[in-house]
Amino acid sequence: MIAALLGAPGVGKGTQAQLAAERNAWTHLSTGDLLREEVARGSELGKRADAIMRSGELVPDAVMVEIVAARLNALPEGETLLLDGFPRSLPQARALDQLCAGRPVGVALYFTAPEAVLTERLLARGRADDSREVIARRLAVYRETTEPLVAYYRERGLIREILADRAIEEIQKDLLRTLREVRADPSSVS
Ligand code: B4P
């Protein structure tokens, strides 16, 4: 099953996906981590992505779709995939539908928390793209470009909300319970 994790920067998608993947031997695909690996390697893509990420903008859709397509092609049959940070725009969501036509997204886990909480978490994390000014831009980009995906997946009956302003283990329990429910009854998503 493919589970797409949606939500604002700092809502904890990466934290939850990493934990669930480690504990259950699932695949965690984080587009943010992939980009940061490219930056660390000093590749051409990394050089372009670094400047974009530091400004709070999104890397172009075509680049991201190509990266994700390669990973999806290599995914073993029947694998559980936690797709963290992709899609982040409507063109990416449409491309994903095409890419995984044979095994479509089974659930979109929509993580929510108040913006003040997100900002505090990101400031505490202190990554290169976590300055107050860049955080504000990333939250604005999220509202403009990524939030419409909630309606996109809701129309398809795939949204499950995860309240993410709680302790990490509580959220993790909720995530696992939700995935179990969806597996047992795919029509339980709303
Ligand atoms: P990402 O790496 O995806 O980062 P994120 O959205 O900021 O963080 P996330 O929600 O995963 O929060 P985390 O668990 O780290 O993106 C970085 C950049 O890459 C983007 O801005 C963009 O430029 C580019 N990019 C990535 N994907 C792209 C795409 N598809 N298209 C275009 N561009 C793309 O948690 C944050 C902090 O909170 C951590 O310090 C954590 O320890 C803490 N935390 C987590 N859960 C907590 C909890 N329950 N309580 C308290 N603290 C918690």
Image: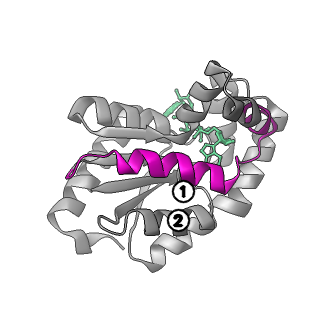
- Residue 166 location in percent, x, y? 45, 39
Q: Nearer the viewer, mark 2 or mark 1?
A: 2
| Mark sitting earlier along the chain (2/1) | 1
**Label placed on residue 87:** 1
Q: Position of residue 187 (x, y in %)?
A: 25, 75
The residue pinned by badge 2 equals: 95
Distance from mark 1 CB to nearest ligand 1 atom below 8 Å = yes
Residues shaded magenta? 50-78
Q: Residue at x 63, y 23 (%)?
A: 125
**Could you say which quadrant of the image residue 37 lies in?**
top right
Q: Position of residue 5 (x, y in %)?
A: 45, 51
Q: CA distance from mark 2 to mark 1?
A: 9 Å
Label placed on residue 7: none
Q: Main secondary structure of the magenta part?
A: helix
Looking at the picture, tell me which residue is in the foreground, 45 or 36. Answer: 45
* Residue 27 visible somewhere in the drawing: yes
Give the amino acid at mark 1.
Answer: Pro
Q: Nearer the viewer, residue 173 or 34?
A: 34
In this view, 170 is above or below 95: above
